[in-house]
Amino acid sequence: MDSRTNQTSPVGGFILLGLSAHPRLEKTFFVLILSVYLVILLGNGVLILVTVLDSRLHTPMYFFLGNLSFLDICYTTSSVPLILDSFLTPRKTIPFSACAVQMFLSFAMGATECVLLGMMAFDRYVAICNPLRYPVVMSKAAYVPMAVGSWAAGITNSVVQTSQAMRLPFCGDNVINHFTCEILAVLKLACADISINVISMVVANVIFLGVPVLFISVSYVFIIATILRIPSAEGRKKAFSTCSAHLTVVVVFYGTILFMYGKPKSKDPLGADKQDLSDKLTSLFYGVVTPMLNPIIYSLRNKDVKAAVRNLVRQ
């Protein structure tokens, strides 16, 4: 037996390829991703500030929005510095332990966002379908545990998935064909049966993707039905405006995921490189563009947020 099969982690860590096969794109994407990252920090940071400082925004919806903004900052910070470094260093080596931490943070933030978007859909459902009961149902004693539960669920899932992946033996090739320690790319390097990992990920995807999507869809069926029953056009417009930002964020978030994992794979070997580049760029879009759009969407579609931002700028 080759002695390498007893090796539990690669010596010197993993090598991240990033866009090293496309050097002409690296400098362009470095400037682009750095600019987007700064917008993410600024936009989400401002949203957190206004939801904390403006007393008019001390409501469940804006509490969830503040959590979403903090989550987006954490998610991008767990990967973007690594991505930027990979553009400057063609063969970026990341230690085994750092890879595990980065994988854990990405998993935790992604799963938490899925659950949090479901909680925000429930908030909008109660606000529109049961407005008289809203102060009771969505009291502080309810919405704070809902947010805490979202974080706890995401972190628990990440602990399970990451620990299972990093317990695998890795031997031979230690090159990850990605920007970051993406779990599927890491699992391909394991020299052991990964069927348990695959089953675990499928179950997690059903729980953290399927269930929230179903819950959000059902919530919006009731929301839209309630809005359509409002007699005045102005009333319908006002009711829809209170949930349009959340609905837009949901469509962008889940639409990108479905495009990323649902598109057919090319069977043409000559197109493998283009397919590989396309997968990487789609992943990059999901990782940085979606968190950048969230504060923009909420700022453009919400009068209260725009007013709070203007007040913050004037101070």
Image: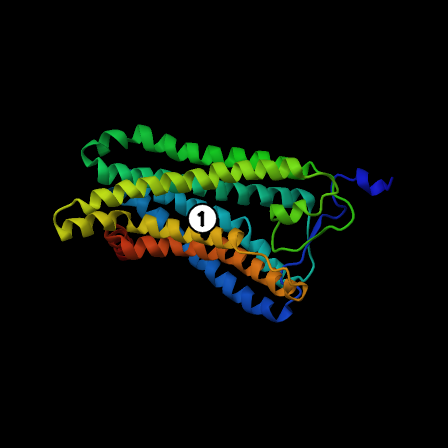
Left or right: residue 240 versus residue 265 is left
Asked where in the image residue 218 lies, by quadrant, the reply is: top left
> Which residue corresponds to the image point at 30% horizontal and 44% vertical from the top-left?
53
Q: Badge 1: how crowded within 10 Å, few (<14), some, or many (20+)?
A: many
Check the image and name the residue furthest to the left. 232
On screen, residue 80 above or below 135: below
> Which residue corresponds to the image point at 27% horizontal and 45% vertical from the top-left?
54
Front position in the image: 198 or 63: 198
Quadrant housing the C terminus:
bottom left
Left or right: residue 314 versus residue 189 is left
> Which residue corresponds to the image point at 46% horizontal and 49% vertical from the top-left?
73
Kind of residue sitting beneath label 1: Asp
Front position in the image: 20 or 194: 194
> Which residue corresponds to the image point at 65% horizontal and 39% vertical from the top-left?
165
The residue under label 1 is: 72
On screen, residue 274 above or below 194: below
Q: Is residue 64 visible?
A: no
Check the image and name the residue furthest to the front. 267
Q: Identify the element where label 1 is drawn.
A: helix
